[in-house]
Structures are given as structure tokens and as C-alpha cells.
Amino acid sequence: MTSLRPLGMTDLLISPLGLGAWAIGCGEWQGGWGPQDDAVSVAAVHRAVELGVNFIDTADSYGPEVSETLIAEALHPYRPGLVIATKAGLVRPSAGEWKRNARPAHLKAACDASLKRLRLERIDVFQLHAPDPQVPFAESVGALAELQRAGKIRHIGVSNVDVRHLDEARGIVRVVSVQNRYNLGDRMHAPVLEDCETDNLAFIPWYPLAAGPLARSRGALERVAKRHGVTSAQIALAWLLQHSPVMLPIPGTGSVEHLEENVAAAAVRLSSSDIRELES
């Protein structure tokens, strides 16, 4: 993998691609509901670190709680420079449910629980997983500010937000990252990405290899992939990496084979004509 670069405006140096850990220890085809095959997941986490991936994105709702626990079991004590980001604000009553809970008391308790599961004294990047319509957004972000002042988290990020939410959050705390859905076939959050580029906030696209939205670009993906001798998924990741200097894709997989394929995408260089064809 290529050289490390700063995570937005922070002093954290990260790899061009991160590892999305929603499938680590959980059911990859069951929406991150587990536990599943720990041995396979541990192998994938170890291989990611061997290949130079040093940014791992997880959440307390993945499993739930399974992903964070397995990451600690696999990698603790953590090697210097490894950055673990986690999130709170979504809860999982059952496999098919994602419910929002961004009440300050819940976020504070969730942070304490994540610290324990990850075996950390401080979380490098702690993200509000989603705004909660039942809770004033400022109160949710304010809770993260309190956790930061208490020394439990180092940097604050937000996820699943629009421009208005981002502006409000930045009026309360120093936001360093935004994690929204974004891929070649789904660029709805382009205005948020533009704000991140303007002020050097890291933009972490989740669902970077979305099968549904990317199907609309399948023909172009296949043609460009064939020219480069790589897979369509690798072209989709390469496009993200070249699309914006603040982009940090985090493809998720519990498979070593898929992981190696994803990491190799960082070396693919698309031409201007490739990009025009993909975006047309």
C-alpha cells in the first residue's frame, strides 16, 4: 500500500484504504449480525494489518458488540500507529432492526462500553452514528464534546448527516471526519463531500461497493476493469480514491481473498478518459 497520509486536519497518519469492520465476526450477508466464524475474521484482520491497513472502522452496533470484541481479541496489544474508529447512536434489537438512540446518557454509556471491549483508554475517533430525530442534535454532539473533555475520545466524527447537521456539529466541536454513504452509483452526499474538501475533513464513504447503485454503472466498470486487468470492485474503489483527496474508503469484508483484492485497488491508476467513462 502507498504511503500514509493525515486523517483530515489531525496528526493521525492513515493508509489510503481502511477496513470496514461491520462484517468482522458478524454475518457478512446478514447485515452485520453475529457472531459468525471468528477464525476467518481474525485472519482477515491480521492480513489487513500485514498489508499496511492501519485504519479500522467499527461500531458498537456491529454484531452487536461482536466486531469490537473480536478486533481487540485479534490485535491487542495494538501496534503503534493503528487507528481504531468506532461509533455509537444506533442500536440493534434484532437482526433486521437498526434504531436510533443518540441520547447523551446512551452515548456516554456506549463510549464506556466500547472502551472496555476494545481494551483502550482512549478512542482515536469516536463518531455519532446517526442523528436521532427524538433528540436535539446539539445535545448528542454535546455529549461527545463532554467525552472528549474527559479524555475518553481523541477526535470526533459524525455519520449519516447532511450539510445542515455538519454545520451545526462544527459550531459545537472540532469535527474531523464525516462518514456517509457514497459510491460511484450513489453521490447524493456530494454537497457534504464538497464541504469536507473545503475544510480538510476526512470523508469516509460507507457502502463503497454497493451492488444496487453500482449496477447502473456495470457496463462502464466492466470495460475499464478489463482494460486494467483488474476487477470491477477494484475499479470502483480506485475511482473513489481518485475522486477526492479527503476520501477514505472502508470496504468491509471478513474474507482474506476479498481483503487482498480491495487493498490492491489502491495501486490502480485511472486515466482521465477512464474517469469520464465511469461518470458518464
Image (cartoon, helix red, strand yellow):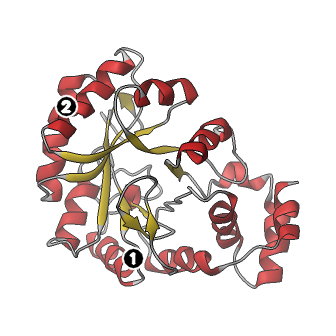
Tell me the element at label 1. helix
The residue at 60%/47% (across/down) is 197
Residue placed most toward the observer, 42 or 165: 165
The residue at 35%/20% (across/down) is 138
Residue 31 drawn at (x, y percent)? 44, 49
**Residue 36, located in which quarter of the rendered image?**
bottom left
Please give left or right for residue 246 compared with residue 277 in the image. Answer: left
Residue 117 drawn at (x, y percent)? 15, 54
In this figure, which residue is indicated by the disc labeled 2? 146
Tell me the element at label 2. helix
In this figure, which residue is indicated by the disc labeled 1? 48
**Residue 107, located in which quarter of the rendered image?**
top left
Dot 2 or dot 1, earlier in sequence: 1
The residue at 16%/71% (across/down) is 76
Residue 229 drawn at (x, y percent)? 75, 85
Rounded to the nearest whole Å, what is the CA distance between mark 2 and mark 1? 33 Å
